[in-house]
Image: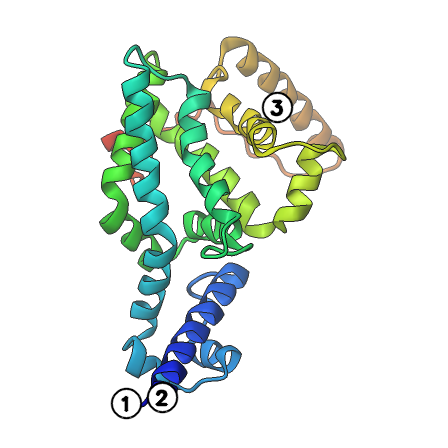
Amino acid sequence: MSTTQRHGHSDTRKRLLEATEWLFIEGGYEAMSLRQITARAGANLAAVNYHFGSKEALVQELLSQRLDRLNRERLQLLSACEQQNPEGLDVTTVLGMLFVPAFRLSHGSASGPAFMRLLGRVYSDPSPFIRGYLQEHYRSISGRFFEAFSRALPALPRHELGLRLHFALKALSGMLAGEDMQELIASISKGETINDAELLARLISLISPILTAPFGSPEQIRLIDQVQQLDRRTAVINDEPVVVPHDEAHGPLGGQQWIKEGRLAP
C-alpha cells in the first residue's frame, strides 16, 4: 500500500469516528444509523466494514478513545488524593475528581470542544448497548468511586447512596448532553470571568445537595401532604376525576439492581 493510500485510509477512519461522535451526541446510539454515519463522513458502507466491521465496533472504538484515558486518569487522581488524605475525603473533593480530569481533557485538541457533551450523552443514553459497554469496561472505576462516596457519606445506607448518585449524575449528564458548553459556562459564570476551579465549584454546588439533603424528612412530607390536599380540592372544583390511593406503599425498585447491590448505575 502506497503512502497516499495509507493516508487516505487513515483519513477515512478519522472521518467515520468524527461523524459517529457528532451523531451520537445529537441523538444517541439508537437514533443513528450506518447510512447516516457514512453520509456525514463522505464514505460508504464498505469503508465501515473495512475499518471497523460493524456499527457496534465503530462506537466501541469511539468510546474507548474518549473514555479510557479519562477513567485511567480519574483513578490515578483518586489514588493520589486518598494517599494525601488518609483520614477521608469530602463529597466536593470526590465529585471534583470526576470532573477535573474531564474539564482538563476538554481543553485539549485530542478530545475536542464537544468532549463534555459526549460524556453527558454517554452517561445519559438509555441504550442497552451503551449501558452494557460501560458496565463491562468501567465497572472497576464505578466501584472505586462508589466506595469513595460511601466513606465521604458514612451515615447513608448503601442503597440510598446508590439512588442519590444515580439521580445526581443522571441529572448532570442530561444537562451536559443537551447544552452547548459555552452557553452553559456563560450561565454558570453569570457574566463574570472565572477560572475552571470556580466554574466546577459552582457546578458541583448545584448537584451536591442531591447527595446531602434530607431524604423525605417529616417536615418535607408534611408540606407535600398539604400540597396534595389542596390539589384534591382544586381538582374537584374543576370537575376532574380524582383517584387517590390510600396510604399507598412504594416498595423497592425491583428492576434497579444497581441500587440493591450498592454501586453506581451502569
Task: Examine the rendered structure and indicate whether residue 34 appears above or below residue 176.
Answer: below
* Labels 2 and 3 touching (C-beta < 8 A): no
For numbered disc 1, what is the local secondary structure?
Answer: loop
For disc 3, the marked residue is 228
Q: Quadrant of the N terminus?
A: bottom left
In this view of the protein, which residue sits in the foreground, 145 or 197? 197
What is the crowding at mark 2: few (fewer than 14 residues within 10 Å), some, or many (at least 20)?
few
Q: Looking at the image, which residue is at 30% across and 10% down? A: 87
Nearest the viewer among 248 and 194 is 194
Taking depth in this image into account, of 43 and 221 the one nearest to the observer is 43
At which x and y percent is residue 225?
A: 58, 18
Q: Residue at x 27, y 45 (%)?
A: 138
Q: Nearer the viewer, residue 139 or 92?
A: 92
Q: Quadrant of the C terminus?
A: top left
Residue 1 image label: 1
- The type of residue carrying mark 3 is Gln
Mark 1 or mark 3: which is in front?
A: 1
- The residue shown at (50%, 83%) is 42
Whether 153 is drawn above or below 19: the answer is: above
Tell me if residue 239 comes above or below residue 35 in the rendering.
Answer: above
Q: Amino acid at mark 2?
A: Gln
Q: Mark 1 to mark 2: distance in Å?
A: 6 Å
Q: State left or right for residue 98 relative to residue 132.
A: right
Q: Which residue is mark 2?
A: 5
Alpha-carbon span between mark 1 and mark 3: 73 Å
